[in-house]
Amino acid sequence: MAVQIMIAILLLLPLYFWERAVGPAPLWNTETAWALAYVGIFPSVIAYTLYITGVARAGAAKAGLFIHLMPVFGTLLAMTFLAESFQLYHLLGIAAILCGLTISTRPSTA
């Protein structure tokens, strides 16, 4: 992970300097600090730790299948926090994902 961070810093640093040169300066306030802290803690540290724990408990093959639940949670979060409306294509997509997970995680009969 440290190598990935170093590569990301090296690749993003020129873009950072370019954006600072041509764009407005960022506005740093308490709201920005809280947003940055949220992104740094929940999706980065906690989610990664929980995913690694899930892989350790369920195994890599089974845990890897559940990455397909991201659109399901994205839909639910968009409905909850952004007041998005639930459409038929959401239902069909969620049903397809759940059917696929059910089929691929059931015990083998062979």
Image (cartoon, rainbow, N blue to C red):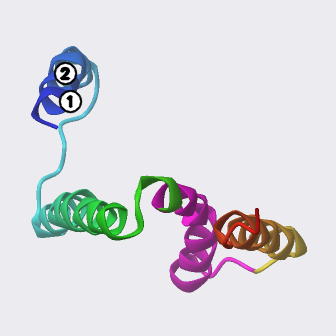
Position of 68 relative to 83 (above/below): above
Q: Which residues are magenta?
A: 63-85
Give the numbered dot on residue 87.
Answer: none
Instruction: Give x and y (percent) for residue 28.
Output: 12, 54
Residue 4 is labelled as 1
Locate the C terminus and report the quarter of the image it occupies: bottom right
Q: Where residue 72 sits in the image (x, y, percent)?
A: 63, 71
The local secondary structure at tag 2 comes to helix
Residue 72 in the figure: left or right of residue 4 = right
Question: In the shown orientation, is residue 63 left or right of residue 79?
Answer: left
- Neighbour tally class for label 2: few under 14, some 14-19, many 20 plus, Cα within 10 Å: few
**Residue at position x 57%, y 58% from top?**
65
Count up the numbered dots. Answer: 2
Which kind of residue does numbered mark 2 sit on? Ile
- Residue 96 horizontal/vertical position (percent): 81, 67
SS state under label 1? helix
The three-letter amino acid code for the residue at tag 1 is Gln
Q: Is residue 85 left or right of residue 5?
A: right
Determine which of the numbered discs, if any, sits on residue 7 in the image.
2
Q: Quadrant of residue 3?
A: top left
Residue contact at pointers 2 and 1, CB within 8 angstroms: yes
Q: Nearer the viewer, residue 56 or 49?
A: 56
Give the main secondary structure of the magenta stretch: helix
**C-alpha separation, residue under disc 2 versus residue under disc 1:** 5 Å
Residue nearest the viewer, comparing 46 with 13: 46
Quadrant position of the N terminus in the picture: top left
Foreground residue among 28 and 66: 66
User: Which residue corresponds to the image point at 69% horizontal and 63% vertical from the top-left?
Assistant: 104
Quadrant of residue 38 within the rendered picture: bottom left
Quarter-wise, where is residue 37 in the image?
Answer: bottom left
Left or right of 107 on screen, residue 42:
left
Could you classify mark 1 by the number of other residues whose Cα lies within 10 Å: few (under 14), some (14-19), or many (20 or more)?
few
